[in-house]
Image (spheres, rainbow, N blue to C red):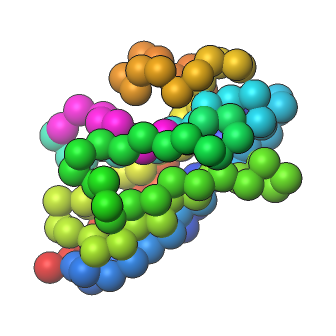
Amino acid sequence: VELQASGGGLVQAGGPLRISCAFSGRTFSDHTMGWFRQAPGKEREFVAAVSWSGGSTYYADSVRGRFTISRDNAKNMVYLQMNSLKSEDTAVYYCAAKLPLLPLGKFHVEDFHYWGQGTQVTVSS
């Protein structure tokens, strides 16, 4: 499996940004997908996850109501729409996939088997 994240950049506080992740190598619709982030000096943390069909989603408390995760199984893509961005959202954002046919379930780093290279999101205040 290969995951390629893109779309990061510099954005002003309060603004929106959408980041994307391209999936290849296996049947995309078999995989629960997630986004994580890691700020300098901090551990990688869960942001959002989406089920195989896209019908179920789950969010970290810190982003719920501001971020939306979605997927397009026809294009093998997963997205993270980020609105009302804050300076504390600044981090490298990583796309991740669970092993095939695992449900949403748990959202720890060790629960996701495949990882992309990350895309930097910087929010200026």
Most foreground residue, 72 or 43: 72
Residue drawn at x 22%, y 79% is 13
Whether 106 is among the magenta residues is no
**Image coords of residue 10 (percent x, y):** 35, 76
Residue drawn at x 37%, y 23% is 108
| Image position of 86 (left or right of 115) | left
Residue drawn at x 16%, y 40% is 41
Visible residue check, residue 109: no
Q: Is residue 51 above or below residue 9?
A: above
The quarter of the displayed image where residue 37 is located: top left
Residue at the front extreme of this rendering: 55
Query: In the rendered structure, which segment of residues is drawn in magenta?
Result: 42-50
Most foreground residue, 81 or 103: 103
What kind of secondary structure does the magenta stretch mostly adopt? strand
| Image position of 52 (left or right of 36) | right
**Image coords of residue 49 (percent x, y):** 49, 40
Marks counted in the figure total 0
**Image coords of residue 50 (percent x, y):** 55, 41
**Image coords of residue 114 (percent x, y):** 60, 27
| Image position of 33 (left or right of 53) | left
The quarter of the displayed image where residue 3 is located: top right
Q: Is residue 46 above or below residue 68?
A: above
The quarter of the displayed image where residue 107 is located: top left
Whether 47 is among the magenta residues is yes
Most foreground residue, 8 or 63: 63
Q: Quadrant of the N terminus?
A: top right
